[in-house]
Amino acid sequence: MSTASGGSAPPGITRDGCKRAITGLGRRAGTGRAPGSVLIAVAAWLLALTGGGALFVSFSAQYAYIFRVRRQDAASVIEALLLDLLMIVFTLLALGLSRAGKSARAERGLILACAAASAYVNMSAADVASPRSVTAYAVAPVALAVVVDRSWR
């Protein structure tokens, strides 16, 4: 009988006819990668870029609004970053808890609460009479919440 790698024998059959464990199932022959892994990696990088962009847009809107109210540069920067950074911290906690086999329900709820609060602060700077303005100001924290929520699943 021929070898599993060089002949017509079924995978897992050795030259002498003995069975061996089949390894590498679900991998493309010769590449060492699981099917779809490149697409998943590209999507993950694009998700990270989207999250970074949403974080920047959300920060900019919140900073502009908070600075108008407070007139303090350092305090405005901290407050503008607070909710979005808390969302990221809760995501990291949720990842750690899920990797440890524990529930992350509370953290997921806190992620959504931070996103809602961030959207509210952003909408405070919007013209509430204009649905376009509200959408433009609220879309970044909502998108960031989707990115953050998706990243730990």
Image (spheres, rainbow, N blue to C red):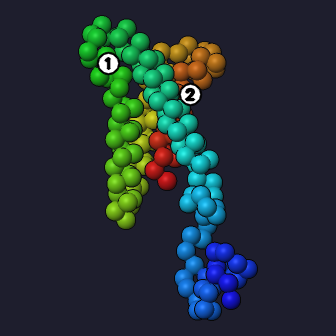
Q: In the rendering, at what x and y percent does residue 141 appear? A: 49, 30
Can you name the residue that lies furthest to the right here?
Answer: 8
Residue at image location 53% in from the left, 32% down from the top: 50
Q: Is residue 117 above or below residue 100?
A: above
Disc 2, SS: helix
Q: Label 1, on which residue?
A: 77
Give the spatial CA distance, label 2 vs label 1: 20 Å
For label 2, count other residues whose C-alpha is less than 10 Å away and answer few (under 14), some (14-19) or many (20+). Answer: some
Residue 92 visible in the displayed image: yes
Residue at image location 39% in from the left, 59% down from the top: 98
Give the number of the disc on residue 106: none
Amino acid of disc 1: Val
Q: Label 2, on which residue?
A: 139
Q: Nearer the viewer, residue 33 or 120?
A: 33
- Quarter of the rendering containing residue 99: bottom left
Q: Nearer the viewer, residue 23 or 54?
A: 23
For label 1, count other residues whose C-alpha is less than 10 Å away and answer few (under 14), some (14-19) or many (20+). Answer: some
Residue at image location 64% in from the left, 20% down from the top: 131
Q: Nearer the viewer, residue 41 or 152?
A: 41
Answer with mark 2 or mark 1, whichever residue precedes in sequence.
Answer: 1
Q: Is residue 98 above or below residue 1?
A: above
Residue at image location 52% in from the left, 15% down from the top: 126
Residue 122 visible in the displayed image: no
Amino acid of disc 2: Val
Q: In the rendering, at what x and y percent does residue 92 appear? A: 36, 46
Do the residues bearing badges 2 and 1 touch, measured as CB atoms within 8 Å? Answer: no
Can you name the residue that lies furthest to the bottom here?
Answer: 17
Disc 1, SS: helix
Q: Is residue 117 left or right of residue 134?
A: left
Q: In the rendering, at what x and y percent does residue 122 appear? A: 47, 22
